[in-house]
Image (cartoon, rainbow, N blue to C red):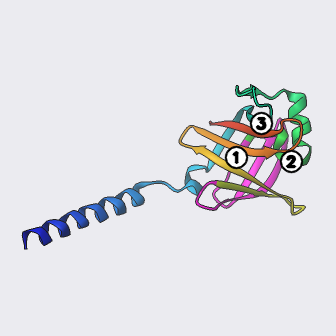
């Protein structure tokens, strides 16, 4: 009888811990809301076998990579809680739809012209947002976009 009570108690404690942890954690949809400033674009992985170092992407290469991406010019991203994202470069602003997909690891942006961009959400905390996208153009690998919350 003692063994059954002990196992039941341990089971209840584990379930209560899991429920408490889940209820206290903040969802990515809530954590991403706010204004984020672009810090850098970097190579995360390139096709060259001997080149394993991260390399910063120059502005010229960034423009080439971003020809098919609308956001490549955005310096500030402001995520609104209603699923809207304001992309701002200087005085120029653009409004797009956003949502978190998958298990909270994919950020999807949808533009007015039905263009859809998917980014891997590799890091999201109170101060840092890191997005990755697979570039088939000149970078030949995964580009890493890093943002800081303002």
The residue sitting at 19% across, 70% down in the picture is 8
The residue segment tinted magenta is: 77-105
Dots 2 and 1: beta carbons under 8 Å? no
Q: Is residue 59 above or below residue 129?
A: above
Q: Which mark is residue 78?
A: 1
Q: Is residue 125 above or below residue 8?
A: above
The residue sitting at 7% across, 74% down in the picture is 1
Quarter of the view holding residue 139: top right
Residue assigned mark 2: 70
Quarter containing the C terminus:
top right
Quick one: label 2, few (<14), some, or many (20+) residues within 10 Å? some
Q: Is residue 91 magenta?
A: yes
In-image side of 68 versus 7 (left or right): right
The residue sitting at 24% across, 67% down in the picture is 12
Q: CA distance from mark 1 to mark 3?
A: 10 Å
Q: Position of residue 123 (x, y in %)?
A: 59, 43
Q: Is residue 81 magenta?
A: yes
Q: Is residue 39 above or below residue 20?
A: above
Give SS at disc 2: helix
Q: Position of residue 134 (x, y in %)?
A: 78, 46
* Camera-nearest residue between 101 and 48: 48
Q: Earlier in the sequence, mark 2 or mark 3?
A: 2
Q: Which mark is residue 19?
A: none
Q: Position of residue 3 (x, y in %)?
A: 11, 68
Quick one: label 3, few (<14), some, or many (20+) residues within 10 Å? some
Q: Is residue 139 above or below residue 25?
A: above
Q: Nearer the viewer, mark 2 or mark 3?
A: 2
Residue assigned mark 3: 75
Give SS at disc 3: loop
């Amino acid at each position: 009888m003692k063994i059954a009570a002990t196992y039941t108690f341990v089971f209840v404690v584990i379930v209560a811990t899991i429920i408490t942890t889940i209820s206290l954690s903040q969802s990515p949809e809530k954590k991403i809301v706010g204004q984020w400033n672009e810090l850098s674009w970097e190579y995360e992985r390139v096709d060259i076998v001997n080149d394993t170092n991260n390399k910063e992407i120059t502005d010229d290469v960034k423009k080439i990579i971003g020809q098919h991406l609308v956001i490549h010019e955005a310096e500030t991203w402001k995520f609104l809680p209603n699923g809207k994202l304001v992309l701002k470069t200087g005085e120029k602003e653009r409004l797009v739809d956003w949502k978190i997909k998958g298990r909270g690891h994919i950020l999807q942006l949808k533009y007015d012209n039905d263009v859809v961009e998917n980014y891997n959400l590799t890091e999201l905390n109170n101060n840092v947002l890191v997005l990755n996208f697979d570039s088939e153009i000149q970078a030949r690998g995964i580009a890493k976009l890093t943002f800081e919350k303002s």
